[in-house]
Image (cartoon, grey):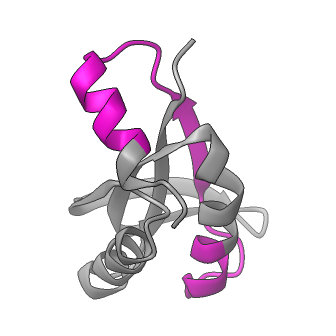
Amino acid sequence: MQNGLLVVTAAATQDDAAGLARSAVRARLAASAQVHGPVRSFFWHLGELGEGEEWVVLLRTTVDRYDELEFHLLGEHPWDNPEMFAVALERGSAAYLDWLTRSTAQS
């Protein structure tokens, strides 16, 4: 069983997305993060179809650090109810998964 997670969130601006990525990695809640975008998003918001530009943030962490990472991102995020979910890393190289675990270890 693997311990790694890919966590996904999004932000309205590149600067907001980079700030979320940087702060999570700096706090060692994520081993790495990438910002992708802009992307065009379509969604339901307040009962209406919404459309807008977003920047996607992909973070790599462990199951053990997810709760703290979620709390951190929700506290730092400018949106009241941001997209946030995690996908289990089913497989990965042993060296990468070891690095992921060491990089997110609590000091």
| Front in this rendered view, residue 46 or 66 | 66
For residue 20, which quarter of the picture?
Answer: bottom left
Q: Tell me if residue 78 comes above or below residue 106 in the rendering.
A: below
| Front in this rendered view, residue 24 or 57 | 24
For residue 70, which quarter of the picture?
Answer: bottom right
Q: Is residue 24 magenta?
A: no
Where residue 43 sits in the image (x, y, percent)?
57, 54
Where residue 101 sits in the image (x, y, percent)?
43, 41
Q: Which residues are magenta?
A: 72-101
Residue furthest front in the image: 107
Q: Tell me if residue 71 comes above or below residue 16 in the rendering.
A: above
Q: Tell me if residue 7 comes above or below residue 87 in the rendering.
A: below
Judged left or right of residue 61, residue 94 is left
Residue at point 36%, 60% (across, down): 57
Judged left or right of residue 73, residue 80 is right
Residue at point 25%, 30% (across, down): 96
Q: Looking at the rendering, in which quadrant would you find the N terminus? A: top right
Residue at point 35%, 54% (across, down): 31
Where residue 33 sits in the image (x, y, percent)?
30, 58
Q: Tell me if residue 25 comes above or below residue 76 in the rendering.
A: above
Judged left or right of residue 96, residue 66 is right
